[in-house]
Amino acid sequence: MANINGTSGNDNLVGTTSADTISGLAGNDTLTGGAGNDVFVYNATADSTTSAFDTITDFTQGADKIDLRPLLGATDLIFVGTTPTLNGVWFQQDVSLNKTFVFADVTGNNTPDLKIQLNGLFTLTSADFLGVAEGDAVPLTVTIDTTNPTVAIDIVATSYERQRQQLAGELHLQRGAGNADLKNLGNNKF
């Protein structure tokens, strides 16, 4: 087993015939695990950005793993397949290029902060990752009590209970004919 680390430049890293841990670090890296159950580690989104992303040439589903644990710390990212998700991981296939792209949002704005290219077409699951939990999209339920000028905001996770939810942007509600505005502005954490 080898620990193979790249530099801040564009690296071509090749593993051994046993299980390896490979981290390309920053730059547009090409990573080849070789034989064995390999782990491709991403310590920060800067390791593989949307404009300078890594390519994993020989990802083997069921054996290799993409380790995203360092990205959110103690909280797992949520995986819901091909759907962009707040603080989540999703994938897209490009059949014409025979590539699968992995995306991760770690800033809670539903925009990819990390991008990884896999050679080949894969239908990925949360089992292909470390630091990623299976989940459903998180619906937002807003309840207004007309007898009390408060707003209750419940964020419900269906199969994955999140310890921390984030409501980004502006929530602007109107209550009744009195047109009393109820506002929740900004980046509020619940």
Image: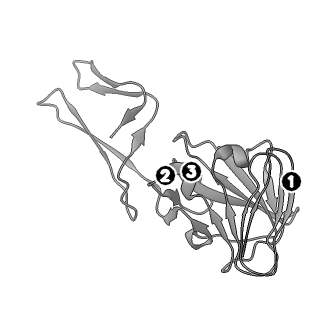
- Residue drawn at 54 percent across, 40 percent down: 107
**What residue is at 35 percent from the left and 52 percent from the top?**
163
Counting every numbered tag in the picture gives: 3
> What residue is shown with label 2?
73
Counting from the top left corner in percent of width and height, residue 84 is at: 59, 51
Question: Image point 66% across, 55% down: which residue?
Answer: 42
Tag of residue 11 = 1
Q: Quadrant of residue 39?
A: bottom right
Q: Of residues 17 and 111, which is closer to you in this image?
A: 17
Q: Amino acid at mark 3?
A: Leu
Q: CA distance from mark 1 to mark 3?
A: 21 Å
Q: Which residue is mark 3?
A: 71
Q: Residues within 10 Å of mark 2 (few under 14, many from 20)?
A: few
Mark toward the viewer: 1 or 3: 1
Q: Are marks 2 and 3 in contact (CB under 8 Å)?
A: yes
**What mark, if any, has residue 78 been given in the picture?**
none
Where residue 63 sits, quadrant-wise, is bottom right
Mark 2: which secondary structure?
loop
* Amino acid marked by disc 2: Gly
Q: The C terminus appears in which quarter of the rendering?
A: top left
- Upstream in sequence: badge 1 or badge 2: 1
User: Which quarter shows the N terminus?
Assistant: bottom right
- Residue in the image at 33% along x and 23% along y: 183
Q: Where 65 sits versus 45, above or below?
A: below
